[in-house]
Image: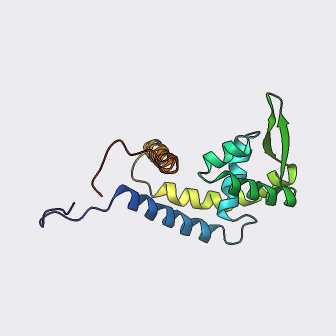
């Protein structure tokens, strides 16, 4: 839909989320340039540290990536000696992933660089962080549902202007 000539063009929420993704990537790349972990690895190590014993499926869902990609990534971290897998007592077919002491050490070493980016970002927020977190959680959930609908072949239930 084209706005009337007297109204400014508004980019979509999805475009702005993409721009946010790129901006965050640039900030993290700059502050973590000399870090022992790159921003993607830091995110996964932090998730595993914060929520240990999650299955690869749970980690893949939280990181919004295919299970095969997560499995390959975890194999790399295992070869580094940074993660360990253990069978879940409640479901012997599944296993949980945890950081090893070496994995915790490298995650802690990268924390200062990530923390610098986080503080820079937080200091420039113009709304309460809790509101940003709630909006981001809602956006992530919407994207995950849209992706599930896309790969599941379901038809959208509503339409929106592009």
Q: Name the colouring of the figure.
A: rainbow
| Horizontal side of residue 22 vs 9, given as left or right | right
Asked whether 97 or 87 is in front, the reply is 87
Asked whether 135 or 58 is in front, the reply is 58
| Residue located farthest toward the top when viewing the structure as drawn | 90
Quarter of the image where one finds residue 98: top right
Which corner quadrant holds the C terminus?
Answer: bottom left
Quarter of the image where one finds residue 109: bottom right
Tag count: 0
Whether 43 is drawn above or below 133: the answer is below
Whether 24 is drawn above or below 60: the answer is below
Quarter of the image where one finds residue 155: top left
What residue do we see at 50% from left, 54% from top? 122
What residue do we see at 54% from left, 69% from top? 26
| Horizontal side of residue 12 vs 122, given as left or right | left
Which corner quadrant holds the N terminus?
Answer: bottom left
Q: Position of residue 32 (x, y in %)?
A: 66, 67
| Horizontal side of residue 23 vs 96, given as left or right | left
Whether 162 is drawn above or below 130: the answer is below
Q: Position of residue 60 (x, y in %)?
A: 65, 49
| Residue located farthest toward the front when viewing the structure as drawn | 153
Q: Position of residue 153 (x, y in %)?
A: 48, 48
Whether 24 is drawn above or below 61: the answer is below
What residue do we see at 50% from left, 66% from top? 22
């Amino acid at each position: 839909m084209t706005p009337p000539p007297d109204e400014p063009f508004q980019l979509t929420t999805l475009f702005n989320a993409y721009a946010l993704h790129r901006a965050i990537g640039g900030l993290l790349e700059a502050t973590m340039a000399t870090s022992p972990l790159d921003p993607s690895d830091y995110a996964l190590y932090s998730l595993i540290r914060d929520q240990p014993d999650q299955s690869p499926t749970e980690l893949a869902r939280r990181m919004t990536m295919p299970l095969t990609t997560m499995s390959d990534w975890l194999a790399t971290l295992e070869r580094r000696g940074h993660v360990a897998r253990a069978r879940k007592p409640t479901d012997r077919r599944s296993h949980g992933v945890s950081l090893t002491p070496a994995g915790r050490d490298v995650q802690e070493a990268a924390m200062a660089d990530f923390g610098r980016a986080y503080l820079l970002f937080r200091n420039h927020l113009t709304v309460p962080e809790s509101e940003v977190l709630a909006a981001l959680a809602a956006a992530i959930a919407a994207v995950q549902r849209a992706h599930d609908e896309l790969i599941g072949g379901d038809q959208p239930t509503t339409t929106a202007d592009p």
